[in-house]
Image (cartoon, rainbow, N blue to C red):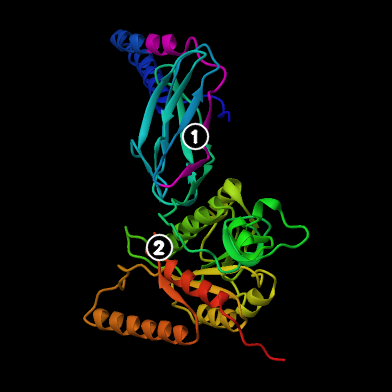
C-alpha cells in the first residue's frame, strides 16, 4: 500500500522562515552579520533537499501463518519498501490486540530504509486465547532529507488470524452405545465380521470355512461355526451452549472450558473413526456437518474459532430437537454450564424423545461473583445450591450430568448408557 506524496515538515518550514527573516532584517537594517549567520543554515537546507525522493515508500502487514494453535507463537511483521534511490527513515506504530501478546510490546519503532531496499518491524508474539483476532492496524510515517520531508500518515489495515483452541486431554475407553455405520471399532448386537464371539451355532449355507469350530464340530458330529459381533462406527453430535459467558479476569471462562472440551471430544472420536458434528445452541443454530478423520477434526477447530455468545432471539429447544440437527441414532454430548432454564428445557426434551444423551457441566470451579460486597459470598452459595438442585432434578428425570475433568470424564456415563442400550426394552403394542 503506497503512502501519499512527500510534504515539508515543521523543521523545513522553520528553517526557511529563519533564513528569510534574517535576510530581510539584514537588508532592512544593513547588517551583514545576519547574512553570515543565515548562510550556513540556508546551505544546509539546500544540501539536504537537493536530492529528494520522488516516490513515497509502500508498507504492508505480513502474516506468516494465519492459523496457529492456542498458546503458540505467531510471526508477523510490517514491511516497508523504498523504491526510490534516496534513503528514508520510517516510523511504525501499532496497538496490541486483546488476546495476542507481542514479544516486543507496543510503541514507536524506527527503521532506516536503504535506497531501493526494504526494512521490517517484527510483530512476533504469542496467541493467548482461541478465536478470531486481528494484528494491527499499524501507522507508518516516512521521513527523508534529514527530516525535512515526510509522507502523510499511512494507516495499514489489520490482518486477521485464527487461533485454534488447544484440545484438553481426553480419553475414553467406553464404547458408544449406538453404532450404526458401515465400519468402525464399536461392538454392536448385530452379527457380522468382528473380533468378539457372539455364539457357536450350526453351519449354514454361506458360512465361511475358516469360521468352523473344529472342536465343537468333532464333539457334535456335525459342522459348527463361530459367529461374531460386527464392529461399526457411530455418530457423535456435540452441542455447545453459547447462551451465556462468564469468567474472572485472567482465568478460564465458561466458553473456554466449553470450546476446549468440544475440541478434545472431537479429536478423540474422529481419531477412532466415528462421525462427529457440532451444533451451537443459542440465538442461531450454527452447525458443522458430520465427518470423520483428521480433516474433520481440523474443520471442527476452524468452526470453533467463531464461537461466541450470540445476541438475538432465542432459537428454541423445540426447533433444535425436531429440526434434523440431532439424528435419533446419534449420541448427543451437550456441553453446558447449566445456568439457564432454556438449557435445562432442551435436556429434558431430548431425554423424553429417547435420544442417547450425555451432559457435560462446563462451569469453571473457580468462578466467583465479579463484585465484592458483604453479601457476595452468601449470594454465591445460595446460587450454587440452587444450581445443584437443578442438576439433581435433571438426574431424577434421567438426564446424565457429569462435570468436565478431562481424561475419563464421560466413561461412567457412557458405560451406564451402553448397558441400558443392550438391555431389553418394553414397548407398547
Chain-order first, disc 1 or disc 2: 1
Q: Nearer the viewer, mark 1 or mark 2?
A: 2
SS assignment at label 2: loop
Tell me what residue is drawn at x 41 percent, y 50 percent: 99
Tell me what residue is drawn at x 33 percent, y 80 percent: 384
Report the magenta residues as a range: 42-70
Q: For residue 153, which numbered disc appears in the image? A: 1
SS assignment at label 1: loop
Q: Is residue 180 above or below residue 25?
A: below
Which quarter of the rendered picture does the N terminus lie within? top right
- Viewer-nearest residue: 194 or 294: 194
Let me know if residue 89 is in the magenta part: no
Q: For residue 172, which numbered disc appears in the image? A: none
Which quarter of the rendered picture does the C terminus lie within? bottom right
Q: Which residue is mark 2?
A: 408
Q: Residue furthest bottom?
A: 429
Left or right of 35? Residue 56 is right
Residue 368 coordinates in the image, percent (x, y): 30, 71
Q: Can the viewer see residue 126 in this picture?
A: yes
Amino acid at each position: 500500500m503506497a503512502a501519499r506524496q512527500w510534504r515539508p515538515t515543521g523543521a523545513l518550514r522553520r528553517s526557511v522562515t529563519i533564513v528569510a527573516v534574517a535576510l530581510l532584517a539584514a537588508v532592512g537594517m544593513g547588517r551583514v552579520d545576519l547574512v553570515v549567520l543565515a548562510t550556513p543554515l540556508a546551505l544546509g537546507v539546500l544540501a539536504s533537499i537537493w536530492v529528494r525522493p520522488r516516490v513515497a515508500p509502500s508498507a504492508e502487514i505480513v502474516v506468516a501463518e494465519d492459523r496457529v494453535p492456542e498458546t503458540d507463537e505467531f510471526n508477523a511483521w510490517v514491511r516497508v519498501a523504498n523504491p526510490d534511490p534516496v534513503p528514508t527513515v520510517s516510523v511504525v506504530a501499532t496497538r496490541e490486540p486483546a488476546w495476542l501478546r507481542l514479544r516486543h510490546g507496543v510503541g514507536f519503532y524506527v527503521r532506516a530504509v536503504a535506497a531501493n531496499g526494504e526494512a521490517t518491524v517484527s510483530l512476533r508474539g504469542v496467541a493467548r486465547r482461541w478465536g478470531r483476532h486481528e494484528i494491527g492496524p499499524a501507522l507508518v510515517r516516512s521521513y527523508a532529507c534529514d527530516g525535512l520531508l515526510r509522507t502523510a500518515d499511512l494507516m495499514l489495515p489489520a490482518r486477521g488470524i485464527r487461533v485454534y483452541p488447544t484440545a484438553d486431554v481426553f480419553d475414553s475407553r467406553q464404547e458408544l452405545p449406538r453404532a450404526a455405520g458401515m465400519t468402525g471399532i464399536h461392538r454392536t448386537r448385530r452379527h457380522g465380521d468382528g473380533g468378539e464371539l457372539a455364539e457357536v451355532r450350526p453351519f449354514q449355507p454361506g458360512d465361511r470355512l475358516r469360521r468352523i469350530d473344529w472342536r465343537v464340530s468333532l464333539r457334535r458330529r456335525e459342522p459348527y461355526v463361530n459367529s461374531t459381533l460386527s464392529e461399526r462406527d457411530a455418530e457423535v453430535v456435540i452441542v455447545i451452549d453459547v447462551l451465556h459467558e462468564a469468567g474472572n479476569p485472567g482465568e478460564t471462562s465458561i466458553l473456554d472450558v466449553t470450546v476446549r472440551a468440544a475440541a478434545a471430544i472431537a479429536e478423540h472420536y474422529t481419531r477412532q473413526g466415528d462421525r462427529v458434528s457440532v451444533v451451537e445452541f443459542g440465538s442461531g443454530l450454527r452447525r458443522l456437518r458430520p465427518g470423520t478423520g483428521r480433516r474433520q477434526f481440523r474443520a471442527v477447530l476452524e468452526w470453533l474459532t467463531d464461537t461466541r455468545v450470540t445476541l438475538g432471539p432465542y432459537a428454541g429447544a423445540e426447533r433444535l430437537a425436531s429440526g434434523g440437527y440431532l439424528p435419533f441414532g446419534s449420541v448427543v454430548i451437550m456441553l453446558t454450564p447449566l445456568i439457564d432454564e432454556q438449557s435445562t428445557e432442551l435436556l429434558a426434551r431430548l431425554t423424553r424423545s429417547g435420544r442417547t444423551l450425555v451432559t457435560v457441566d462446563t462451569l469453571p470451579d473457580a468462578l466467583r461473583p465479579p463484585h465484592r460486597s458483604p453479601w457476595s459470598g452468601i449470594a454465591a452459595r445460595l446460587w450454587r445450591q440452587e444450581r445443584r438442585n437443578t442438576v439433581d432434578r435433571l438426574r431424577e428425570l434421567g438426564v446424565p450430568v457429569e462435570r468436565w475433568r478431562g481424561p475419563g470424564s464421560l466413561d461412567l456415563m457412557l458405560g451406564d448408557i451402553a448397558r441400558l442400550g443392550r438391555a431389553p426394552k418394553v414397548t407398547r403394542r
